[in-house]
């Protein structure tokens, strides 16, 4: 099976264009799914908390979490309504197809 | 949705930003690329999602009207999914996009275009996606 989603990298290009620099920022991604977008920017952020209410999607994201990002990215199976972070001050919140 | 945006307001630093990415309530197009040329084949049908996208637009408009956030910038980009066969596209939709389907007319047009002897060909699903940058407005 050959399915290629956004091989042109249009989504991440638009994200970087609209966020400006994401380097060193604390990022909350809402609706992260299986981490499809997360992997593409997480290297630049200081810390990423990525949430999605779908536990299966989060399980897939955790399975695919690259070792280099383990200290930087935290996935949580939770909705935004139920999400209560230990440190609430984020520099960037990404609503990823989630509203 | 408005409650979610109110919560995001509380989670953001005062100088933070919110990036919203979501599709408009419009059907995605399906093309077949044969060599260098793209041929329109039809549209993807969605049964439930348009209402969600409209509600998302309304929620954003509400929080802007309430002066919780200010829109700093709006834009759009094309999000493409490339597949080799109609069967692969149907499988992809079944797994990833349960409210979407391909009508018989569009499916027949795809099959017709894909039956060309040209080897360099593929099906392209094109979603137009909106992106916006919003900044929280400090409370007076």
Image: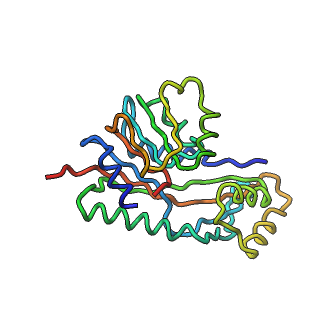
Residue A8: image location, x then y, percent:
58, 46
Give the number of callouts. 0
Residue B23: image location, x then y, percent:
50, 61
Could you say which is closer to the camera, residue B42 or residue A42?
Answer: A42
Residue A87: image location, x then y, percent:
34, 34
Residue A37: image location, x then y, percent:
54, 42
Could you say which is closer to the camera, residue B52 or residue B44?
Answer: B52
Residue ID at (62%, 40%):
A59
- Is residue A14 placed above or below A21 in the rendered structure? below
In the image, taking residue A37 as reference, residue A56 lies left or right, namely right
In the image, taking residue A88 as reference, residue B124 lies left or right, namely right
Q: Quadrant of the C terminus of chain A?
A: bottom left
In the image, taking residue B75 as reference, residue A6 lies left or right, namely right
- Is residue B60 placed above or below A46 in the rendered structure? below
Residue ID at (82%, 53%):
B119
Could you say which is closer to the camera, residue B74 or residue B14?
Answer: B14
Examine the image and state in which quarter residue B103 appears. Answer: bottom right
């Amino acid at each position: 099976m050959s399915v290629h989603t956004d091989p042109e990298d249009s989504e991440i290009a638009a994200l970087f264009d609209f966020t400006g620099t994401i380097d060193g920022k604390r990022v909350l991604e809402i609706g992260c799914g299986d981490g499809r977008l997360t992997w593409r920017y997480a290297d630049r952020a200081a810390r990423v908390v990525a949430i999605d209410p779908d536990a299966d999607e989060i399980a897939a994201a955790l399975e695919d979490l690259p070792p280099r990002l383990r200290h930087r990215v935290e996935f949580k199976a939770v909705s935004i309504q139920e999400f209560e972070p230990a440190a609430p001050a984020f520099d960037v919140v990404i609503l990823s197809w989630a509203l | 949705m408005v409650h979610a945006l109110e919560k995001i307001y509380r989670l953001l630093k005062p100088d933070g930003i919110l990036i919203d990415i979501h599709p408009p309530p419009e059907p995605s197009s399906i093309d077949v690329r044969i060599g260098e040329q793209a041929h329109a084949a039809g549209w993807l049908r969605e049964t439930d999602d348009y209402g969600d996208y409209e509600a998302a637009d309304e929620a954003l408009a509400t929080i802007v009207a309430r002066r919780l956030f200010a829109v700093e910038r709006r834009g759009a980009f094309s999000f493409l999914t490339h597949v080799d066969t109609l069967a692969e596209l149907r499988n992809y939709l079944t797994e990833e996009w349960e409210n979407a389907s391909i009508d018989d007319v569009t499916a027949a047009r795809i099959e017709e275009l894909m039956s060309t002897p040209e080897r360099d060909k593929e099906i392209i699903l094109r979603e137009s996606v909106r992106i916006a940058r919003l900044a929280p407005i400090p409370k007076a």
